[in-house]
Image: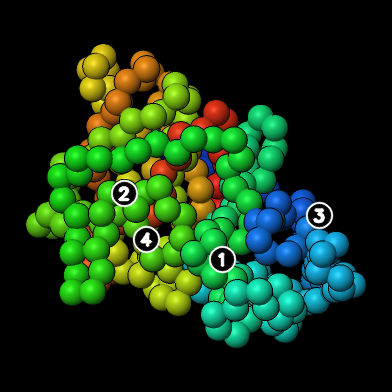
Amino acid sequence: MKKTILLFIITLLTVTLYSQTFSLINRGFPFNPYSGIEDMNLFENGEVEIKFESFMKREDVRLKYEIKTIEHIPFIVFSEPLPKEIFEFDAKEPTNNKMLFLAGQMKKNKRLEIFTFIKGFPFDYGSFTDIIQGEIRPRFYDCSSFLKEKNKEYPVENLQDERPDTPWVENAPGYGIGENFKMNNLGRKPYLLIINGYISYDKPYLYEQNGRIKKLRISGLKSKKSKIVDVLDTPHPQTVDISFLEDEDAMVTIEEVYPGTKYEDTCIHFMQAITDEVIPYTSSY
């Protein structure tokens, strides 16, 4: 009986720790200056208000929206395509009513860190929203392997790129246990932000079909200090503690993975050293 109660308490604590979440309602999204949008607010009644920059010379609009998970990737789906004026200056294809979003909240200052992508706004400009302000991105180098396909490669330098379909993908037999890379320019930041898996706008099923990181070993190249960190199976941004590192380069090694349903390629979409812990919008799919 005591063992059963103890197991229940441990399970309850685990669920509490790994199910932290927050609301996107009335938060306001910090938009990319190229977007022409000043602000966007989601309301509880299922409406979204979009405010335009003054140079757009058009009135604010209200649309209906809903949040959907499509093949384990979260989207905000609007009742109609976003106004075409947002994209007219450099539109490469028609506007879309579906916005991929990856959201995290800073634990201390409650700032929303949200990566968003929508067809019509060129992915070359990066995230539709303005992300991780004031942080210098690490440089990634000396990876043990990376996948090369007929028309595309997935090198470790992709970890600096938040755009869809740009992960680092290892290329070792199996799920790449033991595969590694190095990183520098961490600036003694105490946390490493990670976006796990393969993130794709057009092919969201690639997240589940490929392997995702479950455990990483992070080792200081100078201090030789090492730590294994747990990574949640979620596409949303999350952080792991790297405060044990000194002012040094580090090696990151795959220790354990969440297996893919189709491929044995393990993917990491993005990494960034930051100053505050980030709580993912949801802890898992």
Total numbered circles: 4
In space, the residues marked 4 and 1 are separated at their CA atoms by 13 Å
How many residues crowd mark 2 within 10 Å: few (<14), some (14–19), many (20+)?
some
The earlier-in-sequence mark between 4 and 1 is 1
The earlier-in-sequence mark between 1 and 2 is 1
The earlier-in-sequence mark between 4 and 3 is 3
The earlier-in-sequence mark between 4 and 2 is 2
Q: Can residue 260 be seen in this view?
A: no
Q: Could you tell me residue 131's position as x and y percent? A: 59, 48
Residue 26: numbered disc: 3
In space, the residues marked 3 and 2 are separated at their CA atoms by 35 Å
| Mark 3 or 2: the one toward you | 2
Q: Relative to 217, say whether 201 is above or below.
A: below
Q: Is mark 4 on a helix, strand or loop?
A: loop
How many residues crowd mark 3 within 10 Å: few (<14), some (14–19), many (20+)?
few
Q: Could you tell me residue 14's position as x and y percent? A: 49, 39
Q: Is residue 60 left or right of residue 220?
A: right
Q: In this view, does 173 lie to the left or right of 248?
A: left
In space, the residues marked 4 and 2 are separated at their CA atoms by 9 Å
Which residue position is annotated with label 2? 157
Q: How are the residues colored?
A: rainbow
How many residues crowd mark 1 within 10 Å: few (<14), some (14–19), many (20+)?
many
On the image, which quarter does residue 4 sit in? top left
In space, the residues marked 4 and 3 are separated at their CA atoms by 31 Å
